[in-house]
Image (cartoon, grey):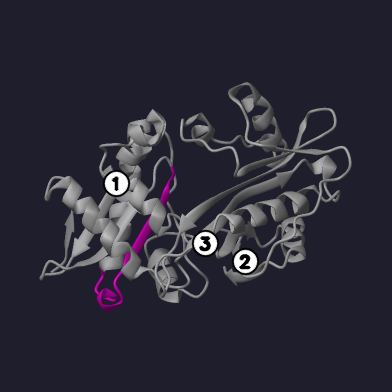
Amino acid sequence: MLHDHNPSSISKHIRLARGVGIVPGLLTPQTRYDAPTVSDVRWLLAPGQGWLSSGESPTEVAYCVMTQRVTALWEDEQGQLIAYALIAQPGSILTFQVDQEAHGQGLEAAILAWGVAQMQAIAQARGLSRELWCRCHESERERRAVLQAAGFAPFPERDLRLVHPLATPVSPVALPDGYSLRRGVTSAEWDAYQDLHQAVFEGIGMSLDDHQSSAYHPDPDLIAVEPSGRFAAFCQCQLKNVVHQQGEPLVGEVGVIGVRPALLRQGLGRALLLTALRQLQERGASLVFLETQETNGPARRLLASVECTTRSS
């Protein structure tokens, strides 16, 4: 018999600590870079004391609290944890992993049903229509079958995960003449930053939660500035821990990179990306990973130019 536990059935903090502990053992070489990574999970499920003293904004704390409310663990008859699931807030992506020995017992279907119910409750509480998403790698055929049986449909655009080992020194290149490099933005520049993001991503805005936090560090937030002072391109990166055979090495993630459409093919994206790789290397990252859509030709050409290789899809 399998049991799922929520905050009402066992101590909340003990439950969350057990959840963090089970994550490394359930990840595979294919899923170790999936968000949330093991360091992300530790932050999301950490006990609340000390959040604000560590610099997190009230909004970030609220996201952690909300995520903990939509986190569940499953154990076998002996009380051994064999699965976890969570929906990291404020998003709508269901993350779950099941112990290999528990596959084929219907647990995955039960987790998906739990996830759908949680997402329905969130949508109802917010008065919004929300879809539930779940990552599935191309090689995870059993997982794909379970997802489709539960009513999930493949997204038409396929994502690619690429990596760049940092075993050798990275040599950054200069920005084009007249452009300057900025690290981070001030609150007075948030509108200009949003304007850049919307220009790059066809009107889609960006969350400024990280920038509004007292723990915001400007160094990983790289911006190329035109001679006129307008923001031209940006690259956001961060350090994370992932699960590996040798432990939990520090790696870098390039979360987003973009150039104003009118300024493409001038070397802005490549210069920012190489600067980010060098910076992450200097801070101890052993490799860098990032994702892009298979159909994004400009991004794939840029990544190929700095010798990023596809790890999975």
**Identity of the residue drawn at 71% across and 41% down:** 200
* Above/below status of 216 relative to 148: above
Residue linked to disc 1: 46
Residue 254 shown left or right of residue 213 in the figure: right
Residue 132 shown left or right of residue 108 in the figure: right
Q: Is residue 41 magenta?
A: no
Q: Position of residue 152 (x, y in %)?
A: 44, 59
The span from disc 2 to disc 1 (Cα, nearest Å) is 30 Å
Of the residues tagged 2 and 1, which is closer to the observer?
2
The quarter of the image holding the C terminus is bottom right
Q: Position of residue 229 (x, y in %)?
A: 79, 28
Residue reaching furthest to the top: 188
Q: Which amino acid does label 3 sit on?
A: Pro
Compare marks 2 and 1 and give the one earlier in the sequence.
1
**Identity of the residue drawn at 58% across and 36% down:** 206
Kind of element beneath mark 1? loop
Q: Where is residue 198 in the image (x, y as percent from the top left)?
A: 68, 35
**Identity of the residue drawn at 49% across and 33% down:** 209
Q: Tell me which segment is drawn in magenta.
A: 91-106
Cβ atoms under marks 3 and 1 closer than 8 Å:
no
User: Who is closer to the viewer here, 81 or 277?
Assistant: 277
Kind of element beneath mark 2? loop
Q: Which amino acid does label 2 sit on?
A: Leu
Residue 79 in view of the camera? yes
Query: Residue 166, which numbered label?
Result: 2
Residue linked to disc 3: 154
The quarter of the image holding the N terminus is bottom left
Disc 3: CA contacts within 10 A as few (<14), some (14-19) or many (>=20)? some
User: Who is closer to the viewer here, 34 or 154?
Assistant: 34
Compare marks 3 and 2 and give the one earlier in the sequence.
3
Q: Does the magenta stretch include residue 105?
A: yes
